[in-house]
Amino acid sequence: MEYPEKHLRVERCVICGTRLPSGTREDFCPFCVPDDPVALEVRRLGDCELFEELGRGSMGVVWRGRQLGLDRAVAVKTLPGGDLAAGEARERFQLEARAIARLKHPNITAIYDVGEADGTPYFVMEFVNGESLSAYISQNSIPARKAAGLLREAALAVQHAHENGVLHRDLKPSNILIESETDRLCVTDFGLAKFTDGQGAASLSGKAAGSPAYMPPEQARHGESTIRSDVYGLGSVLYCMLTGRAPFRGESLAAVLAQVESEEPLPPRSLNPDVPRDLENICLKCLEKNPERRYATAEALAEDLQRFLDRQAVLARPANPAKKAWRIMRRHPWRVAAMALAMALVGAVMVSLFWKAHNDRQHAMALEKEQSATARALMHTQLGEAQAIISLREADSRLRAEEIIRKVVTQRSTPDLSSHARDIAIQAMALPFAKTEAMPGGGVAANDWTMTTADLAGERWALAEFGGRVSIRSSKSAAEISSFTTAPRKITALMRFSPTGRWLAMRHG
């Protein structure tokens, strides 16, 4: 790889890419100098030349450079501010170099040298020709099995760090590099590292350092970090590879931290249905709020990922609904209490409405029963009246009884009343069919024992008395035309004129 020689005249700044006037020194860019007052001082640090800025963060600036003595490409990390850097920042910078120096793993960037030039601390690291995992994710959709393989490499690297007494404490996609040619994964940026043997821990303990969206709850709450905290970080990296986003995100830092402490991440399959269920279970096990429910070590996580890759049964299992509900209750006691109170109020209202409806129904049933009893009594009275009329056996008893029975039948009656009405109707049908009619001229029959009928022409009508006397009268004047008697036999059925009007039929007994 060729790099520009120092002090050559260039058309663009090698750091920021700004077009420069002809004759401008490459190490003097008016746009870079205000952002980094010591930019001119760090272009040559010890045995290294610096060419371009690769990344910048709170813990330092990383440059692409060349180690002159060994003539190899390197990455050089410097501490911004030089002599002006705070004591704690210097201590953290030195701690990071010491942490990396402890480690020797193919998936962790190696450190070559450490020093200070003109008051600017720096250390020289392996140069990984590639891009960060966060940049890779933004441009590519990572298949589930590839994501599992990459995270397994990261987990083994983190396990190596743990075995050498180093906690990373800031695992996230931007702190992982992917080498372009080989897809080799490298864990980088140990700027927030902590030694588990106590060295360097005093200056960093008790502080919620890290990236909120990828930070475990215990670290966000109290700054506490353990091996299982790094397992959580690995799970957040896997989550991002599977879904393309962090486990939690919000409009503000406070909103994100609140979610980290109290909310469950959305299941990866809800964001990406192509994620295998076993891999989702592995991911969510890493992201458990309670550290005791996570994998005990990064190695245990790597082993479960290997089972997934080998298509074997994994150890991670989803929490059942009862456990999920219990966890929510423990994390949100006040919210659960409020929901319980609301449900109690709703329940009380529902019970009140139920009892009101029940009472209204009982009242309606009682009223209906009372009305039914009244109607039943009335029907009994009516049937009794019909029975009495039938027993008199008067000429029009049949019609009068049938009229009463018809009223009873049209009402809602019980089976026993219907049966009683049917029996009375049968008795009524056995009676003669007769009725009392108004007499022509406005008169009426003299008594209830009188039966009348008219001929078809309407010119005459006959009046028969129950005693046996029959009178034929004119329809116009009511004057008697003729009469006869059937005595001593009594007339028992209504008379009928023949169609010609010559004959008059009757029944007598």
Image: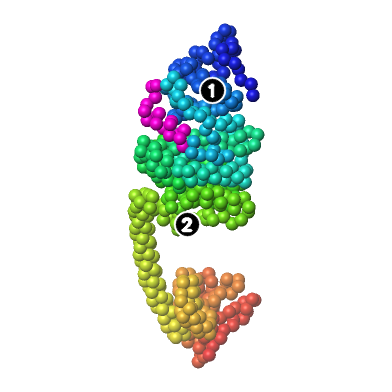
Specify start and end residues of the magenta stretch as a single range: 83-100
Q: CA distance from mark 1 to mark 2?
A: 58 Å
Q: Quadrant of residue 259?
A: top left
Quadrant housing the N terminus:
top right
Front residue (pair 493, 137): 137
Q: Which residue is mark 2?
A: 321
Measured as percent of width and height from the top left, residue 279 is found at 57, 49
Label located before the other in sequence (1 or 2): 1
Front residue (pair 101, 331): 101
Please give the name of the residue rendered at 51% of the width and 44% of the height, measured from the top-left corner. Answer: 160
Q: Main secondary structure of the magenta part?
A: helix
Measured as percent of width and height from the top left, residue 287 is found at 48, 47
Viewer-nearest of discs 1 and 2: 1
Q: Is residue 254 a member of the stretch shown in magenta?
A: no
Measured as percent of width and height from the top left, residue 231 is found at 48, 46
Q: Secondary structure at mark 2?
A: helix
On the picture, is 78 further left or further right than 279?
Answer: left
Q: Secondary structure at mark 1?
A: strand
Measured as percent of width and height from the top left, residue 439 is found at 48, 73
Q: Which residue is mark 1?
A: 48
